[in-house]
């Protein structure tokens, strides 16, 4: 089992590096396309006054639509109190506990953390939120600015990573009602794979200008995946 955890960590680091490269290439590609479009517009000549008016009206309509979408996808509330009650399940038993707002020392986010867990920097751009009684049970937290990476690339990398550690079987897509549901969470996706002794789960979602990636390493004898997920879905940019 330990070898599986090590393999997972190695694959995650490698894919993260690949993600950064792909994001850079994607950005350069967009710039080239923009330059080509400008040159093409100049070659085609000036638009008529009537076309200019129509374009202006369309631009206003697109701006209004963009603002409406932005209002529908508001990030977590700007006013985050020092404490929050989290409801989660352990072995089908529903529990409620108070979580405290905790800042990441390494990344630009905070989350609500339950007692009995510790949030610490694991490596650049990766934190570990682990169970004090059993550090082998933990959640890796990664946040990436939308200015630096593509949501789709991060999501695809997560799926590839879960598939890579599934050892001869296909990873299972997590049901919609089991995905992150917190305030400001947009486009959640998740996959998991189960072993004899535990489960590895991966989630990706958008929160404001952040792309959030969670990787949960749980053991069957502990079964705290839902507790980790409820803490993870409160990840939001620091205020």
Image (cartoon, rainbow, N blue to C red):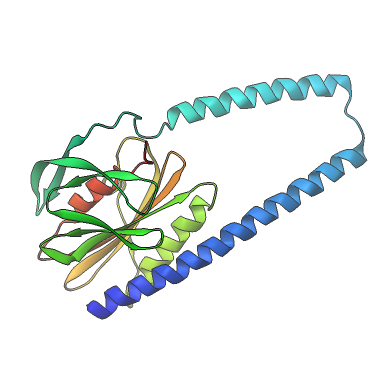
In the rendered image, residue 47, in percent from the top left (x then y), is placed at 88, 28
Res 165 visible: no
In the rendered image, residue 236, in percent from the top left (x then y), is placed at 35, 41
Q: Residue at the location (77% across, 21% down)?
A: 54
Q: Residue at the location (9% across, 44% down)?
A: 94
Q: Quadrant of the N terminus?
A: bottom left
In the depicted structure, whether residue 55 falls above or below residue 176: above
Q: Residue at the location (34% across, 72% down)?
A: 8
Work out which residue is located at the far front of the displayed protein and give it: 105
Q: Residue at the location (92% across, 41% down)?
A: 43
In the depicted structure, whether residue 235 falls above or below residue 219: above
In the rendered image, residue 81, in percent from the top left (x then y), is placed at 24, 31
Q: Nearer the viewer, residue 181 or 39?
A: 39
Work out which residue is located at the far bottom of the displayed protein and give it: 3
Residue 226 left/right relative to 111: left
Res 128 visible: yes
Residue 226 left/right relative to 56: left
In the rendered image, residue 200, in percent from the top left (x then y), is placed at 27, 65
Q: Nearer the viewer, residue 239 or 41?
A: 239
Residue 22 left/right relative to 94: right
The total of numbered circles placed on residues is 0
Q: Nearer the viewer, residue 50 or 130?
A: 130
Q: Quadrant of the C terminus?
A: top left
Quadrant of the rendered image containing residue 221: bottom left
In the depicted structure, whether residue 13 falls above or below residue 106: below
In the depicted structure, whether residue 95 falls above or below residue 239: below
Q: Nearer the viewer, residue 99 or 170?
A: 99
């Amino acid at each position: 089992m330990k070898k599986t955890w090590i393999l997972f960590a190695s694959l995650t680091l490698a894919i993260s590096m690949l993600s950064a490269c792909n994001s850079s290439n994607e950005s350069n590609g967009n710039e080239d396309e923009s330059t080509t479009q400008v040159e093409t517009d100049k070659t085609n000549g000036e638009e008529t006054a009537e076309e200019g008016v129509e374009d202006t009206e369309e631009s206003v309509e697109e701006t209004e639509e963009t603002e409406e979408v932005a209002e529908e996808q508001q990030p977590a509330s700007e006013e985050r109190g020092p404490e929050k009650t989290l409801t989660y399940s352990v072995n089908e038993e529903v529990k409620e506990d108070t979580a405290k707002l905790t800042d990441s020392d390494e990344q630009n986010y905070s989350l609500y953390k339950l007692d009995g867990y510790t949030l610490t920097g694991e490596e650049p751009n990766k934190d570990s939120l682990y169970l004090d009684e059993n550090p082998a049970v933990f959640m890796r937290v990664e946040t990436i600015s939308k200015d630096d990476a593509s949501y789709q690339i991060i999501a695809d990398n997560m799926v590839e990573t879960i598939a890579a550690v599934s050892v001869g079987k296909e990873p299972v897509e997590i049901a919609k009602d089991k995905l992150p549901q917190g305030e400001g969470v947009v486009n959640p996706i998740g996959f998991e794979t189960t072993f004899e002794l535990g489960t590895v789960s991966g989630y990706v979602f958008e929160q404001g200008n952040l792309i959030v990636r969670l990787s949960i390493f749980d053991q069957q004898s502990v079964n705290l995946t839902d507790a980790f997920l409820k803490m993870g879905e409160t990840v939001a940019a620091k205020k």
